[in-house]
């Protein structure tokens, strides 16, 4: 049923597929990967978004914004979706990070490294509150790591 729903969406002109390791604990990415392999689905015409930062259903280990976790998450997402790259890699729910400093010193540099390696074409940010997003973007600019 998942495949048919995604196929119908694609056939109807929907080209943006948004997922995350958090969605179905990886199964959403697997389904998107399998859908991209179906006859008539042209990966080059799709925009695939996924996220980093939020992973596990257990509250104690649900979030990890470290450099290492970010790199590993992107590698796992690419593997699950069996694709060469992610169109937009998004920082997921940074409001749950223990500090903005962690986001600035580890998460964003890891995201930039993923982009540098060609694993992500663009970077984004999703979650709330918007004031936090503004602070993250301002701090990233100050450190010359935004781009």
Image (spheres, rainbow, N blue to C red):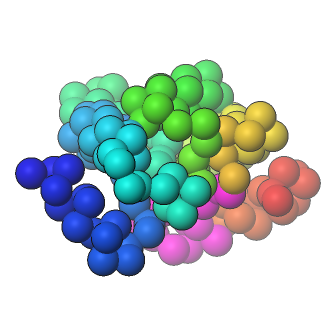
User: Can residue 93 be spotted in the picture?
Assistant: no
Residue 119, horizontal then vertical, whole percent: 66, 39
User: Can residue 53 be spotted in the picture?
Assistant: yes
Q: Residue at x 47, y 40 (%)?
A: 53
Q: Residue at x 61, y 22 (%)?
A: 68
Left of 17 or right of it: where is 72? Answer: right
User: How many discs appear?
Assistant: 0
Q: Residue at x 55, y 27 (%)?
A: 75
Q: Which residues are magenta?
A: 122-134
Q: Residue at x 33, y 45 (%)?
A: 38
Q: Residue 147 or 16: which is nearer the viewer?
A: 16
Q: Quadrant of the C terminus?
A: bottom right
Residue 40, horizontal then vertical, whole percent: 38, 56
Left of 44 or right of it: where is 126? Answer: left
Question: In the picture shown, does residue 59 fall above or below 138?
Answer: above
Residue 30, quarter of picture = top left
Q: Is residue 125 magenta?
A: yes
Residue 41, horizontal then vertical, whole percent: 40, 55
Left of 97 or right of it: where is 139? Answer: right
Residue 146, quarter of picture = bottom right
Q: Is residue 62 magenta?
A: no
Question: In the picture shown, does residue 142 fall above or below 53?
Answer: below
Residue 57, horizontal then vertical, whole percent: 22, 33
């Amino acid at each position: 049923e998942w495949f048919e729903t995604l196929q119908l969406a694609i056939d109807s002109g929907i080209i943006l597929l948004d997922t995350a390791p958090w969605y179905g604990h990886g199964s959403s990415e697997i389904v998107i990967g399998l859908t991209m392999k179906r006859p008539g689905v042209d990966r080059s015409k799709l925009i695939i978004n996924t996220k980093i930062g939020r992973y596990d259903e257990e509250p104690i280990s649900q979030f990890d914004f470290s450099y290492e976790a970010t790199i590993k998450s992107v590698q796992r997402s690419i593997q699950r979706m069996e694709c060469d790259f992610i169109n937009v890699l998004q920082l997921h729910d940074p409001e749950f990070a223990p500090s903005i400093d962690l986001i600035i010193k580890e998460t964003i540099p890891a995201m930039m490294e993923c982009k540098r390696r060609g694993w992500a074409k663009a970077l984004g940010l999703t979650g709330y509150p918007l004031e936090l997003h503004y602070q993250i973007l301002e701090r990233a600019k100050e450190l010359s790591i935004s781009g």
